[in-house]
Image (cartoon, rainbow, N blue to C red):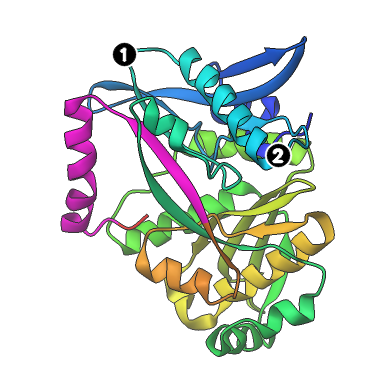
Amino acid sequence: MKNCIFEEPWYLDAVAPNNWYVAEVFKNNQVHARLVYSKKKQFGQKIICNPPFAQTVGPWILDTNAKKVNNLAREKELLNELIEQLPSRVNIDLTLDSNRQYVLPFRWKGFRYEPTFSYRISDLTNLEQIYDEFRENIKRDIKKSEKKITVKEDLPIEVLIELQNKTFARQKRKNPYDIETIKRLDKSCREHNAAKLFAAVDSEENIHAVAYFIYDSERCYYMFSGADPEFRNSGAGCFLTWEGIKFAAKHSKVFDFEGSNVEDIEQVFRSFGGDFVVNYRVFRFNLWSLFMDYLKPKIKKIIGYKH
């Protein structure tokens, strides 16, 4: 049974210790569907949600190679059974994998849904062709960095955290990530040969930027990055992204940028020529949580929050 890396027990133990759960549907003593989730409190309300640092949560459904017309009927039945297993009278907010485009069963169970977006390089077999698809400004940044930057691999995770802190400090914000969770995640991923950290370093040992990737045999995810504001114009971020893509080509089938709703970040990801990918967020809130969900992006805009 193939898991997405976000559904691996060791991954979940790292990001959500003692706080991850699985809904499963069995047919003839075999698992046919599975949904992983976590729990949190937000605005004083209990919410069922994606585990931390889990971009999507499936649901995973066993492929039986059925006809499309029969497959959708089966998928509806399995999704209904998974939804019925979720705790009642609790807010639910989940982001599903792009493989799960059939979200109508959630709507019929009282959920709302909205698309979220990412970019993905779906074929890593021809790196020359991938590079040709980059926008010219991305190529210029890569070439500029190649002249003065070298890549150091697998430095301690504290290097990433330090640059993240500098990045958010420039925005006059506190680092929103839970540092201890990142450390646990890094330790577990390295133990399972599932993470790679690249640092862009100049001849004077200044670290311009760091990029952190999590991967399995199917996908490589661009999880974290950080940059020193003093070297913002060195092109190191684009350079490391290209290094990550080349690394992914040796270990995975797909490179996933993980997406962002921030316009400036989305523009950079789009410039690498990947495929536009839609994931669906499905949510079922009480009136108070629905109101706060409506207010949240407006408050972020007022305070200049970018994430």
User: Is 289 contained in the magenta span?
Assistant: yes
Q: Position of residue 107 (x, y in %)?
A: 38, 33
- Please tell me how crowded label 1 is: few (under 14), some (14-19), or many (20+) other residues with Cα within 10 Å: few
Residue matched to label 2: 189
Kindly identify the residue that appears in the image at 44 percent across and 75 percent down. Answer: 230
Q: Is residue 230 left or right of residue 6?
A: left
Q: Position of residue 32 (x, y in %)?
A: 70, 22
Q: Position of residue 290 (x, y in %)?
A: 22, 33
Kindly identify the residue that appears in the image at 62 percent across and 68 percent down. Answer: 241
Q: Is residue 80 left or right of residue 256?
A: left
Callout 1 secondary element: loop
Where does the magenta region start and end?
278-305
* Residue 201 shows up from this direction: no
Instruction: From this view, report whether residue 190 is shown above or below residue 284.
Output: below
Kindly identify the residue that appears in the image at 70 percent across and 81 percent down. Answer: 131
Residue matched to label 1: 89
Amino acid type for the residue under numbered disc 1? Arg
Callout 2 secondary element: helix
Depth check: give the residue in front, 71 or 299. 71
- Please tell me how crowded label 2 is: few (under 14), some (14-19), or many (20+) other residues with Cα within 10 Å: many
The N terminus - image quarter:
top right
Q: How many marks?
A: 2
Q: Earlier in the sequence, mark 1 or mark 2?
A: 1
Kindly identify the residue that appears in the image at 78 percent across and 54 percent down. Answer: 252
Residue 265, picture quadrant: bottom left
- Which mark is drawn over residue 231? none
Instruction: From this view, report whether residue 197 is shown above or below residue 18.
Output: below
Q: Position of residue 150 (x, y in %)?
A: 71, 75
